[in-house]
Each structure stands twice: as structure tokens, then as C-alpha cells.
Image: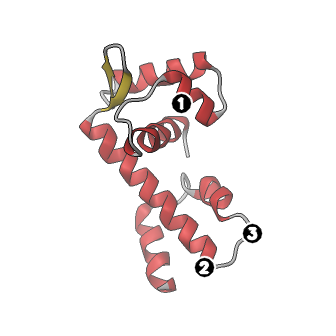
Amino acid sequence: MNEKEQYLKTIYNLTSSGEETTTTKQVSENLNVSNASASEAVQKLEEDKLVCRVPYKGFTLSPPGKKLGKELREKNQKLEKIFRKAEVEDPEKEAEKVENHISSEVVEKLLSKLD
């Protein structure tokens, strides 16, 4: 998964589980990166119109950002399911490794073969 996608998925996870906004501090802690790195990445996402600033509250994903974040999370969850069914030792870690190198179409085909 490239850096942009990793940040989008993280922000989606942080904002879809209760709070609708998050902060660069929360993102940096979640990804174990510096605040400066998280701030720079969020700024790039904002330039791409995937993130919106919320005055005094941090930021949230724009509608296109939410859509992409949701797609990324779902792809990851499907890969984890595939690896669990295949009895891979650490399905979460393996899903993170391959999700940037496999299309959603292939994930769907693999999943359908396992059900």
C-alpha cells in the first residue's frame, strides 16, 4: 500500500469509528510516524481534495476521500479473510504486505473461490 492509501485508510478508520474528525496527532500515533510526517501527508491529501479541515476540530475525509478510504479498508478486510481461511500465521500483516500489489477484482475472485 502506498503512503497516500495508508493515510487515507487510517483516517477512514479513525473517523468512521465514532468521531467524525481526527487530528494529525492521532494519525501520527496510529501510524507510528512523526507529527511532521503526518501533517505533510494530510496537507497533500487536502490538496488532492480528499481531506477537509474542520476549524478547531482537526480534519475529516471529503466525500471522495471517504469513498476511497472505505474501498481500501474493505479490500484489506477481504484479504485478511482470505489469509485467515488459508490459515496464514499473521493475516493482518500479510494483508498489509500485498494489498498494494493486488487488484480489487483479483481479491473478489479469490474470495469467491474460498466461500
Q: Earlier in the sequence, mark 3 or mark 1?
A: 1
Q: CA distance from mark 2 to mark 1?
A: 31 Å
Toward which corner of the image does residue 92 lie, by quadrant?
A: bottom right
* Element class at badge 1: helix
Q: Left or right? Give the position of 84 relative to 26.
A: right
Q: Image point 43% across, 19% down: which residue?
A: 43
Rendered image: mark on residue 85: 2
CB under 8 Å between discs 2 and 1: no
Local crowd size for mark 3, using a 10 Å CA cut-off: few (<14), some (14–19), many (≥20): few
Q: Earlier in the sequence, mark 2 or mark 1?
A: 1
* Element class at badge 2: helix
* Residue type beneath disc 2: Lys
Furthest toward the front, the residue is: 18
Q: Image point 53% across, 30% down: which residue?
A: 27
Toward which corner of the image does residue 86 lie, by quadrant?
A: bottom right
The vertical placement of 22 against 12, above or below, is: above
* Residue type beneath disc 1: Val
CB under 8 Å between discs 3 and 1: no
Expressed as whole percent of the image width and height from the top left, the position of residue 69 reads: 39, 45
The vertical placement of 4 against 80, above or below, is: above
Rendered image: mark on residue 89: 3
Q: Image point 56% across, 73% down: which residue?
A: 82
Local crowd size for mark 1, using a 10 Å CA cut-off: few (<14), some (14–19), many (≥20): many
Q: Image point 59% across, 18% down: which residue?
A: 35
Residue position marked by numbered label 1 in the rendering: 27
Q: CA distance from mark 2 to mark 3?
A: 11 Å
